Image (cartoon, grey):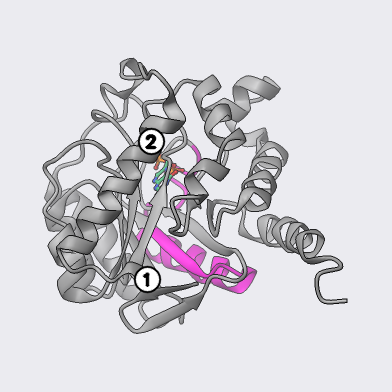
Amino acid sequence: MKLRCRDHVLPLDRTLIMGVLNVTPDSFSDGGLYFEPAAAVERGLEMVEEGADIIDVGGESTRPGAVDVPEEEELRRVIPVLRGLAGAGVPLSIDTRKAEVARSGLEAGAAILNDTLGEETQRGTDEMAAESGAAMVVMHSRGSPATMRSLTDYDDVVLHVRVFLKERGQELERVGVAPESIVLDPGIGFAKTPAQNLELLRRLGELVDVGRPILVGTSRKSFIGQVLDLPEDQRVEGTLASVCWAVAKGARIVRVHDVKETKRAVRLTEAIAAAGIHE
Ligand code: HH2
């Protein structure tokens, strides 16, 4: 399996690490740290040094309860950072809920659209991916950051997310997105209870079975805090446990803040998975 995103073709026979770069004052974990474009570019380059295969640039927090960011402000945050990282040698991804930000992000050099709208239908980005050759990450969510906490009723969360992702993948192919440019993501923490997040991870194999690469984003999220009773700045070990579990279950891309630590943990997980196969 390969991931095609504009000029880049990334092998998927090993796990890809997507480094999180939030150019926001209020993201739940790194909010405020990289709000200045120069600091954000520096952190992006540092993550590439640490082994990130993709850098995901976002200008609006999606944490439950986050306030909406006007389009001009979101553009002001992300565009200089995408431009500044254009020569970094790895594909850049633009994490946005707005079609106009996605369009400008592509113009500024992004090769991946990270579509976190989920079941919301005001998108308009599918055709952009088809026309530009960008890859598209389709993430499951419901409602908006303001409402998602109350939208957690599912008969069976895994089956629901599976059907949604499968259908979105087919829809993308219908508008002309290449099959090798489509990535599916259960949207850990988006309109899910802590128990539902754990169940999605436990049964991740049912999503892998859809037959497209799966991206998992658990990094420092609150379900880890709930299980371990730890604040956001002490969730690295919990993140690594969840990432290794996801990789063992077949996830091909992991979205994380702690790139260096994740790289080491994932390499060991892969070594275990491959042990004895080639002897
Ligand atoms: N999680 C977050 C944001 N974007 N994109 C994908 N594809 N999958 C995810 O799980 C995902 C995502 C939320 O995490 P973070 O960026 O750290 O926080 P915030 O939204 O507060 O900026």
Locate residue 222 relative to residue 265 in the image: left or right: left
Q: Which residue is mark 2?
A: 161
Q: Which residue is mark 1?
A: 180
Whether the magenta-drawn stretch holds residue 33 is answered as: yes
Give the CA separation, mark 1 to mark 2.
Answer: 21 Å
The residue sitting at 60% across, 53% down in the picture is: 250
| Towards the viewer: 229 or 74 | 229
Say which element carries label 1. helix
Provide residue 207's location: percent of width, then percent of height: 48, 45
Name the N-terminal-most of marks 1 and 2: 2
The residue sitting at 47% across, 20% down in the picture is: 193
The residue sitting at 50% across, 24% down in the picture is: 196
User: Would you say residue 217 is visible in this rendering?
Assistant: yes
Locate residue 277 relative to residue 211 in the image: left or right: right
Whether the magenta-drawn stretch holds residue 204 is answered as: no
| Towards the viewer: 158 or 27 | 158
In the image, the segment drawn in magenta is: 29-56
| Towards the viewer: 62 or 204 | 204
Locate residue 273 relative to residue 132 in the image: left or right: right
| Towards the viewer: 84 or 260 | 260
